[in-house]
Amino acid sequence: MSINWTGVFPAVTTQVREDLSIDIPDTQRVVDDLIRDGVTGVIALGTVGENNSLTFEEKVEVLTAIVEAVDGRVPVVTGVSEYDTRRAATYAQAAENAGATGLMLLPPMVYVPKAKELAAHFRGVAEKTALPIMLYNNPPAYRTQIDNEVLSLIADVKNIVAIKESAPDTRRFTDVKTAFGDRFVLFAGLDDVALEGLYLGAQGWVSGLTNAFPKESVELVNAFQRGDHAKAMEIYRWFMPLLHLDAEHDLVQSIKLAEQVMGRGSERVLPPRYVLEGARRAEVIAMVEKAAATRPTLTPVAKAA
């Protein structure tokens, strides 16, 4: 199965009202703004989209609304983050019916499976959908490693086509390429090693801080792809203090606060998360404001219709 996924795919935020109900129109606006600023795909209901804080019905509602807002302009890949294979397969089927372009499939939540169990989970979901699947490897967050043993067990599954690699050890990109060649499309998934991932063979970047600075994120990848490594490095070094936020446990609150400072969205989050407070809140605001005041010069990006 071939896919055309490349470039910058922000893990978009789910907007929340003061009463903690889901703000569907504002979620759609946030996504539309990102597309108009040049992103080449969106991840709906990833970690940053607060997937595990939503009910099944809310997930389907949010995904359906995002698909509607995107209107075919870019791929819509939705996170599949469930406790077990049955729930994951059920959501995968609902996502396909809602018009998603693909799935970003996580290991099962809570339980840490052995390689054979993890491969069976991925295979069990893949068998229930025709959509292309990106596996999401994030050992620090989810305590599960999608290593080469697991990949060898599912390499024959045709609709498992990509890997979002969020391990902080960038050797993973080379190890996967060495073992499997071009069998899997690689995406950088941890913001503060994104450029390293591109140099090591990633075809795109699933990003958190793109929600606050989409034009700079797009130009970072565009500069790398056109061989302007000096410009890519300039943007990356400017961006790095904020990109480190993506590796922290409060990444969702930090990213949504950055969105708010930049006038793009609200910092409100769903329980059990709280908005940032005190010194941490002041620190993140200061970082975003400094970044905004020192933005690098960019090549204009053609806006989507």
Image: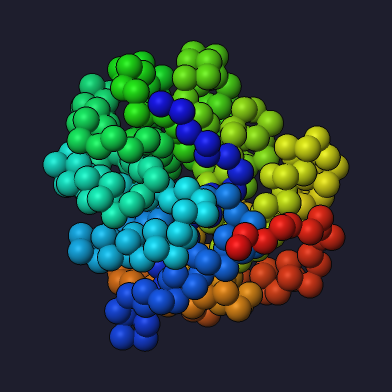
Determine which quarter of the picture holds residue 177: top right
Identify the residue at the far left of this view: 86
Which residue shows up at 31% across the image and 80% down it? 20
Determine which quarter of the picture holds residue 261: bottom right
Q: Which of 272 and 101 is in front in this view?
A: 101
Residue 248 appears in the figure: no
Residue 200 appears in the figure: yes
* Above or below 264: residue 8: above
Image quarter hosting the N terminus: top left
What's the coloring here? rainbow
Identify the residue at the far bottom of this view: 18
Rendered location of residue 194, percent (x, y): 62, 42
Left or right: residue 30 versus residue 139 is: right
Q: Which of 217 and 34 is in front in this view?
A: 34
Rendered location of residue 141, percent (x, y): 40, 46
Determine which quarter of the picture holds residue 264: bottom right
Question: Looking at the image, how many numbered discs can be counted on the residues?
Answer: 0
Which residue shows up at 73% across the image and 70% down it? 292
Rendered location of residue 56, percent (x, y): 20, 60
Which residue shows up at 43% across the image and 51% down it? 76
Which residue shows up at 79% across the image and 59% down it? 300
* Above or below 179: residue 236: below
Image quarter hosting the C terminus: bottom right
* Above or below 116: residue 17: below
Rendered location of residue 17, percent (x, y): 37, 82
Q: Which of 202 and 255 is in front in this view?
A: 202
